[in-house]
Amino acid sequence: MKFIINLLAALTIVSLLAASPVKAQQTGCPEHFANGQPPDFINQKLIAKTREICYSGFAVKHSGVTRTPIYAAEHLTRDRIFQGKGLKRQSKFHPDENIPRSERAELRHYAKSGYDRGHVAPSADMFDIQSQYECFSLSNMVPQVPENNRGPWEGIESAVRMMAKSKGDLYVVTGPIYHGSNIEQIGGSVMVPTKLFKAIYDPQRKEAGAYLIDNTADAQPQKVTIEELEKIAGISMFPSVEASVKSRLMRLPEPRSYIDRKRKGGR
């Protein structure tokens, strides 16, 4: 069952009135972040009911308000991609017991909602059975329009893996954005994002950029600088990275659909 809520009554997700980040965030899993430093919140209202969950293949900053990730972060390498090649998909979705019931998503929230359980850190990025299992936690999911999740968004995920194979070493931060005062809610609890982003940083070449897409069936990806994305999302994606890098858009590949990749013989 779907609901529309006035998000302003509970939390203003995208007020960018705060001009600077709060003090540097602490992390229990620095290996997932560029220079060991997790994203900072520019919009301090995003901090409410957040908690970090450290997994073997990624880290999640989870919101008990939206019952979704604020972001998931990965250190994506060529070796990791090849290690996970051919790994059988462990596709058993499950609630995250690291999160109190009052703040987490349950399987019933997504049931008959019309939305996919969309991965934030992708399952195809994972490298062993444990990381695959962790990736299917509902703390790593957002309600996503099926045509989006299985179409252009999957193309973005694949394009970033191809970049990791080519460049060898990337840091990736992925997450939802909630724009507007009326945000849809499924199962009476889980908020539906209006946009999704994937930010990429290449530490060897000192380059960065991001994909941004609406959570709609007919959406097409945009390519934006990290500086532009941070203004929209209210999050400093890579706090330790120089402003000059964030203001320039790295060369990002055009996302291609799975069908198109198979037709042309590429993955």
Image: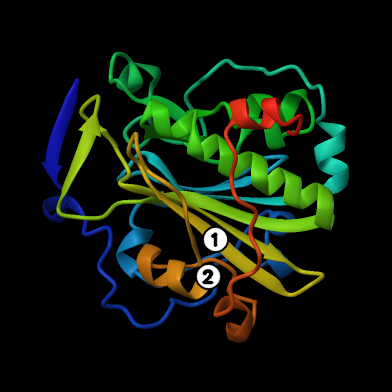
| Residue at 35% over, 43% down | 64
On the image, the x and y values in percent for residue 250 come to: 64, 69
Q: CA distance from mark 2 to mark 1?
A: 6 Å
On the image, the x and y values in percent for residue 260 come to: 62, 31
Asked if residue 73 lies left or right of residue 163, the reply is: left
Residue that carries the numbered disc 2 in the rendered image: 226
Quarter of the rendering containing residue 241? bottom right
On the image, the x and y values in percent for residue 141 come to: 46, 34
Asked if residue 11 lies left or right of residue 6, the reply is: right
Tell me if I can see residue 41 in this picture.
Answer: no
How many numbered markers are drawn? 2
Tell me if I can see residue 236 in this picture.
Answer: yes
2 or 1: tag closer to the N-terminus: 1
| Residue at 69% over, 72% down | 207
Residue 84's place in the image compared with 240, above or below, is above
Instruction: Evaluate if marks 2 and 1 touch, with contact meaning CB atoms under 8 Å apart.
Output: yes
